[in-house]
Structure formats: structure tokens, C-alpha cells
Image (tube, helix red, strand yellow):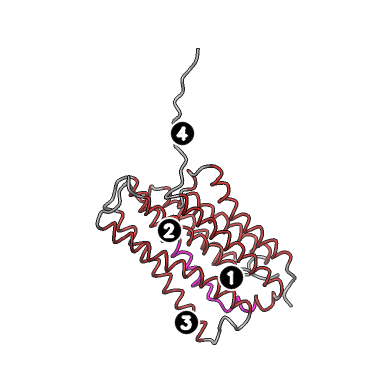
């Protein structure tokens, strides 16, 4: 078992890169708040999905369980973004 | 002519026992409700939430995320090694999970110390009440998870687990990944959410 060839290693590297993109890229003032916040939460949902599928091994879970868990990150991201867009600007 | 086919599809299964997944699902729903409640509170006073957010240590929060992702990866490798019968590798991967869990606790302690030194308390305003509540509940999950990983690590050094006896490690690993994914949402929610 070579660690470098493991799928979980590739997923981990991807998650690390995405974390750096959101923390030290999208959060800066290079983008409008809407673009930054949508990007940050879509990336967070994608990261959670990969944690579920590859670290938690839900890729091989019964279909219904997998669908229910996969709905969670996107449902949560949609709810957060819904509230965000419904919130007025700061004074 | 009828052709007989052999179904080679891998059987679908949940790691560990079903009860752990019920607990994980329930915990996920509770956190989703907390996230929604936070957003509702933010809607009432976005100016205070935005000003308070700027006092958080974003770099430390980002490093915390990298630490927990690495921790999850290490524990996932332990389960992979266990499945393949490479039991001698399991303790070192689990130790990686334990040490990164401890690193997260140290990092959070530094962050809390910074806040208290600056005179910030949960009662300072609604944002900080939510900040201490969400990160505090999550930290309790980290402490519990790190304790479970330490228990697994000690047992794995004695050769207690194998490819045919891995229910307990799989349950703990699934819980630990939940701790990781909750932080993946908590971090942008508190630290990165700019206001309009």
C-alpha cells in the first residue's frame, strides 16, 4: 500500500488546495462580496462531499443513505447563501 | 440462448455499525439548525457581526482546517491499512490522528486566550456568543474524538484490530470525519463570511 497512490491521498491534497484557495484567496478583497461568499460556500460544500464520499466511505454506502448524506452539504450551503442574500448591507 | 451473468458489483455497506450513522446524521441535523440560527441572528445585526468577524484570527482558522483535514486523512489511511491486513501500519496512522487532534486543541486554546486577553467574552455581543458556542461545541467533539482515537491507538499497538475485526475503528473513524466536515462549514461561516 503506497500512501501516494491511495485515492484518499489525492482527495486530501485537493482538499488542502481548496482550503488555501478559500482562506487566502477568495476571502481577500479581490472579489466582490457576493462572488467571494458564493465561491467560499460552494467550495465548502464540495469539500464536505469529498470528506463524506472518500474519508467516510459513503461512496460504497447504500444509495439512500448516500443521497441523504450528500444532500446535507448542499442543503446547508443553500440555506446559508439564502440568508446571506436576504440580509441587508452593513451600515 | 440464455447467458448467465455473474454479478461482480461490490456490496454496498456502511462502515462500522448503523447506530453510529444515526448519531452522525442526528448531529449533522443539529449543527445545520445551529448554522441556520446563526444566520438568522446575523440577519438582525449584520454590522456588529461583520465588525466582530474581523477580530477573529483567520490564519489560525485556516491552519485549523488544514490540521483537521490532515487528521482525517491519517485516520482514513489507518482504516485502509486495516482492511488490507497491514496491521503494523495502523498505530502510526492513528497516532497521526491523535497528534493532529491535539494540535487543533492547542490552536483553539491560543485563539481563546487571544480573545480573553482582548477582553472578549461570550456576553460581549451576539456574534461572540455564537462564536464561542459553535467553536466550543465543536471543540468538545474534538476532545471526545481525540480520546477515542487515543484508545484505538493503544489497542492497535497490542494488535487488537484486524481486517476481520475493524467495527470499532470504523465507528470512531466515521465520527472523526464528522468532526472534520463540521469544521469545514464552521470556519467559513464565522471567519470568512463577508457582508454586503
Whether callout 3 and callout 4 share a subunit is answered yes
Question: Image quarter for residue B41?
Answer: bottom right
The numbered mark, 4 or 2, whose residue comes first in the sequence reads: 4
| Residue located beneath label 3 in the image | B113
Q: Chain of mark 1?
A: B
| Residue located beneath label 4 in the image | B9
Q: Is residue A80 left or right of residue B21?
A: right
Whether callout 4 and callout 2 share a subunit is answered yes
The numbered mark, 1 or 3, whose residue comes first in the sequence reads: 3
Mark 4 and 2 residues: CB-CB less than 8 Å, in contact?
A: no
Q: Chain of mark 2?
A: B
Give the farthest residue toward the front.
B19
Does residue B167 belong to the magenta stretch?
no
The numbered mark, 1 or 4, whose residue comes first in the sequence reads: 4
| Residue located beneath label 2 in the image | B72
Mark 1 and 4 residues: CB-CB less than 8 Å, in contact?
A: no
Cα gap from disc 1 to disc 2, whole angstroms: 22 Å
Amino acid at each position: 500500500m503506497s500512501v501516494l497512490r491511495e485515492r484518499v491521498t489525492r482527495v486530501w491534497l485537493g482538499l488542502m488546495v481548496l482550503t488555501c484557495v478559500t482562506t487566502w484567496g477568495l476571502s481577500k478583497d479581490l472579489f466582490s462580496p457576493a462572488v467571494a461568499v458564493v465561491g467560499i460556500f460552494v467550495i465548502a460544500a464540495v469539500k464536505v462531499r469529498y470528506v463524506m464520499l472518500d474519508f467516510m466511505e459513503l461512496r460504497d454506502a447504500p444509495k439512500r443513505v448516500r443521497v441523504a448524506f450528500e444532500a446535507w452539504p448542499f442543503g446547508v450551503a443553500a440555506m446559508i447563501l439564502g440568508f446571506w442574500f436576504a440580509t441587508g448591507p452593513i451600515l | 440462448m440464455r447467458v448467465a451473468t455473474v454479478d461482480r458489483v461490490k456490496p454496498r455497506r456502511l462502515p462500522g455499525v448503523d447506530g453510529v450513522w444515526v448519531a452522525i446524521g442526528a448531529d449533522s441535523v443539529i449543527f445545520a439548525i445551529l448554522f441556520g440560527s446563526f444566520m438568522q441572528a446575523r440577519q438582525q445585526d449584520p454590522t456588529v457581526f461583520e465588525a466582530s468577524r474581523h477580530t477573529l484570527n483567520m490564519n489560525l482558522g485556516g491552519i485549523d482546517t488544514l490540521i483537521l483535514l490532515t487528521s482525517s486523512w491519517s485516520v482514513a489511511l489507518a482504516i485502509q491499512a486495516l482492511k488490507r491486513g497491514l496491521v503494523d501500519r495502523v498505530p502510526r496512522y492513528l497516532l497521526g490522528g491523535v497528534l493532529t487532534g491535539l494540535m487543533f486543541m492547542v490552536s483553539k486554546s491560543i485563539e481563546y486566550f487571544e480573545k480573553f486577553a482582548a477582553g472578549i467574552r461570550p456576553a460581549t455581543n451576539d456574534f461572540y456568543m455564537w462564536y464561542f458556542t459553535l467553536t466550543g461545541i465543536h471543540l468538545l467533539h474534538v476532545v471526545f474524538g481525540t480520546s477515542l482515537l487515543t484508545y484505538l491507538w493503544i489497542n492497535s499497538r497490542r494488535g487488537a484490530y484486524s481486517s476481520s475485526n475493524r467495527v470499532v475503528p470504523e465507528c470512531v473513524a466515521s465520527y472523526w470525519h464528522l468532526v472534520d466536515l463540521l469544521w469545514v462549514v464552521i470556519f467559513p461561516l464565522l471567519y470568512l463570511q463577508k457582508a454586503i
